[in-house]
Every structure is written in structure tokens, then in C-alpha cells.
């Protein structure tokens, strides 16, 4: 991660007309904590929090697990919120409505994962998410370059869910994106201190 951040800093200097954000997908652990510590989380511009394990939790416990995760002020996007894989795996037991209400209250975006095997958030929840004030993030979940084309599928699903450009995080310009990413984190008092502890080379300062 430190090496990647150094490379991003170099690219920012080389191409000042481009906005390159530092982001990560962080696993939501059993208790709702994230798999990176706060010192590291503080170095990212945005954090996607996602469940990848222990998918058979009871509904109440899974709901609390995800609520705990999105309440962490480093989290800006909840990834593939129901964990489904079409024709392979059912969504995990989850109070989706409660999660959407809390995400809207916190200002956390929710991903519409555009991978054809996921399409999660389901289009039927999109309008409810927007009603809660949530910006939807269309994510291709690309594991190789041609996976970036999944974004076109995501746009189609978003349209099916009656979303417009104004409802989609990806349609924001770079300054609006930065403002969205920073809005909740400003209240995170350790953030400024932790960011100041890292040099441009990604080395921990004393």
C-alpha cells in the first residue's frame, strides 16, 4: 500500500490535470471492524467496506455487523451490500432497509456492483436508497482491464432502478468527489494527526 501511494503521488506530480484518488476495499470482519487499522485507513481518500466472509450469520447479527462498519468515519462506500452472486449464491440475511436508512443518515454511498454475477445493490432498492439521500456508486469490480466494461451494465441497471446522473456518485466532478469523500472524515479528529505522520514517501514520521 505504501508503495502504491508513492506511485500515485508521483503520477499526481507528473499529470497535474488529472485527479487520482487513493482508495481501498476493506473487509468487514465478523464484529463489524475493518481489516486495516486507523493509521492506514487515514491515508486513503476513500474506503469501500465489504463483507467477504462469514456470510451465513443470522439476520440481526449481519445487520449489526454492517451498521458497525459503515459507522466508521473512514468508510465512504458500502460495497456489494447484500453479497449475492446471481445463479450461485443467495443474498445473506440482512435488514436492507435499516442499512439504507443508516447509510443515508451518515452520508455513506452504496455500491451498485456492476459485475454481471452480482448486480448488487438490486435495482428494486435503488429508488429507496435515493429517497434516503444516498448517492449510488456504480462499481465495475474489475479484476482485469476488460472488466472495466462492466460499468455499462451498471449504468443499465441504474436506469432500470430509475436513477439519474444526479443520483450517481461517479457522475460527480473531481472536486465534488473529494468533498464527498472528506465530509464525514473531517469530524474524525485522529485523521489530521495521522495523515501528518506520513511523509510523501509513505514513511512513518516520529
Image: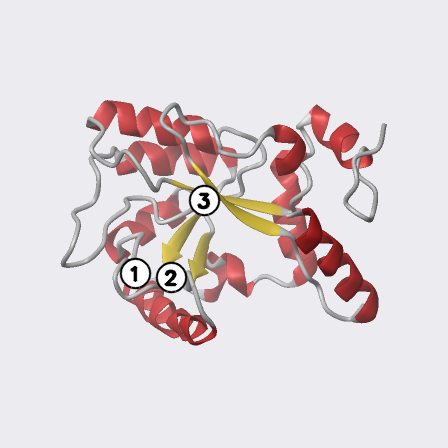
**Could you say which is closer to the camera, residue 204 or residue 120?**
204
Q: Earlier in the sequence, mark 3 or mark 1?
A: 3
**How far across and down, in percent of the image, does residue 120 sit?**
30, 54
Which quadrant of the structure image shows residue 16? bottom right
Q: Is residue 203 depicted above or below 152 in this figure?
A: above
Q: Which residue is mark 3?
A: 133
**Badge 1: residue crowd in 10 Å (few <14, some 14–19, many ≥20):** some
**Could you say which is closer to the camera, residue 196 or residue 95?**
196
**Badge 2: residue crowd in 10 Å (few <14, some 14–19, many ≥20):** some
Q: Residue at x 82, y 70 (%)?
A: 14
Q: Which residue is mark 2?
A: 163
Q: Which residue is mark 1?
A: 161
**Could you say which is closer to the camera, residue 60 or residue 104?**
60
**Badge 3: residue crowd in 10 Å (few <14, some 14–19, many ≥20):** some
> Mark 3 falls on what kind of element?
loop
Q: Residue at x 62, y 37 (%)?
A: 41
Amino acid at each position: 500500500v505504501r508503495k502504491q501511494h508513492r506511485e500515485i503521488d508521483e503520477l499526481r506530480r507528473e499529470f497535474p490535470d488529472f485527479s487520482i484518488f487513493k482508495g481501498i476495499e476493506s473487509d468487514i470482519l465478523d464484529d463489524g471492524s475493518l481489516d486495516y487499522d486507523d493509521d492506514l485507513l487515514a491515508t486513503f481518500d476513500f474506503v469501500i467496506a465489504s463483507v467477504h466472509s462469514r456470510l451465513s450469520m443470522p439476520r440481526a447479527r449481519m445487520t449489526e455487523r454492517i451498521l458497525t462498519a459503515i459507522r466508521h468515519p473512514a468508510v465512504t462506500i458500502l460495497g456489494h451490500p447484500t453479497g449475492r452472486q446471481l445463479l450461485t449464491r443467495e443474498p445473506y440475511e440482512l435488514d436492507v432497509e435499516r442499512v439504507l436508512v443508516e447509510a443515508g443518515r451518515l452520508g455513506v454511498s452504496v455500491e451498485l456492483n456492476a459485475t454481471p454475477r452480482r448486480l448488487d445493490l438490486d435495482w428494486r432498492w435503488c429508488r429507496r436508497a435515493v429517497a434516503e439521500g444516498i448517492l449510488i456508486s456504480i462499481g465495475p469490480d474489475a479484476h482485469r482491464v476488460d472488466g472495466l466494461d462492466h460499468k455499462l451494465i451498471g449504468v443499465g441497471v441504474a436506469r432500470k432502478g430509475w436513477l439519474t446522473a444526479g443520483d450517481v456518485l461517479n457522475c460527480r466532478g473531481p472536486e465534488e468527489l473529494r468533498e464527498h469523500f472528506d465530509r464525514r472524515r473531517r469530524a474524525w479528529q485522529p485523521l489530521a494527526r495521522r495523515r501528518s505522520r506520513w511523509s510523501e514517501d509513505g514513511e512513518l514520521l516520529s
